[in-house]
Image (cartoon, rainbow, N blue to C red):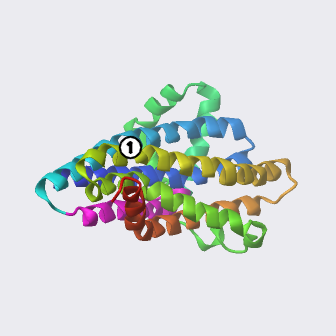
Amino acid sequence: MEKILLKLMVLTFVIHLIDTLAYSVRLNSVKSGQFALSFSLFNLFVLISRSANMFQAPLIGFIIGVSISQGIDPINDMRKVILASTIGVLVGIFLIPTFLKVFEVAVRKLEITGSIPSLVVEALQINNIKRMVRSATKPSKTMIQRLRYREIPKRLLIINVLITGIYTIGVLAANYSAILVEEQYRLAAVGSSGMINGLATILLTLFIDPKSAIITDQAIRGTRPYGDVKALVVLLITTKLVGTLLGQILFLPAAKVIASFYGS
C-alpha cells in the first residue's frame, strides 16, 4: 500500500503544481498581449492536470478499500496526500519565474508552428530540456514589492481560500467517509466526491474566474496597471496555499458531514 500512497502523493503534487503555475499565465498574456494564444497553450497544462486527477480517485479508493479490509484508519495517509498538495503549491511558487520564461518562448514558437503536438515534441528534445534547466530563475522580492494589493477585492481572496480547501479534500473526504458508514452505503458515499468537486468548480466559475478575467482584460486594454495583475496572481496563489492548509482542518469534518447523509 505504501507504493500506492506514494503514487497518489506524486499525482496530487503534480495537480497542484500545474494549477499553481496556471495562475501565472495571466501575467504572460498581459505582458505579451497574446491573450488567446497564451490560453490556448495553457489548456495543454490544464489537460495534464485533469488527466492526473482522473487517476487520483482509483488510488484513493484502493487505499480506503485495503484499510477497511484490514480494519485500520488511513487518516494519516489522507493527511499526507493533503500535505502533498501544499508542497505542490510551494514548489509551483518557486518555479513561476522559470515557468514564465519558458512559457513566453513556447507561445512565440506556437505562433510560428501553429501546432501544440509539434511544440511538445520539440520541448522534449534533450537540448531544449537543458536550455530550460539553464533558464531557471529564483523568485525575487521585486516580484511582490510595491504591488497594489488594496485594489484586489478581499472577498475574492476569501472565496478562493474556501474553494481551494474544498477542492483539495473533496475526493479524499468522500472516500474516507466510506469508513464511517455502513457497508451498504459506502458506494454512495464515495460517489459524493463528484458532487463536492462539482460544487467547487461552480463556485470557481461564478466568483473567481469572472472577476479575475475583468482585472486581466482591463490591464490588457491599458485601463488598469500591469501591477494589478501581478498583485492578483500573487494573492490568488497565496490564498491557494492557505486553502490547502485549510484542507487539513476541513478534511475530517467534511467526511463526517458526508457520512451523516447516510445515517452515520
Q: Quadrant of residue 194?
A: top left
In this view, the residue in front, 13 or 97, is: 13
Q: Position of residue 219 (x, y in %)?
A: 80, 53
- Left or right: residue 34 compared with residue 176: right
Amino acid at dot 1? Gly
In this view, the residue in front, 179 or 50, is: 179
Q: Quadrant of residue 105?
A: top right
Q: Is residue 257 visible?
A: yes
In this view, the residue in front, 254 or 264, is: 264
34 magenta-colored: no
Numbered circles on residues, count: 1
Q: Position of residue 27 (x, y in %)?
A: 67, 53
- Left or right: residue 220 compared with residue 90: right
Q: Position of residue 81 (x, y in %)?
A: 33, 59
76 magenta-colored: yes
Residue at image x 49%, y 62%?
A: 165
Residue that label 1 marks: 191
Residue at image x 66%, y 54%?
A: 208
Residue 143 in the image: above or below residue 173: below
Quadrant of the frame with the C terminus = bottom left
Look at the magenta stretch and give its main secondary structure: helix
* Residue bounds of the magenta highlight: 73-96
Residue 31 in the image: above or below residue 55: below
In this view, the residue in front, 112 or 3, is: 3
- Left or right: residue 80 compared with residue 67: right
Identity of the residue furthest to the left in this view: 70
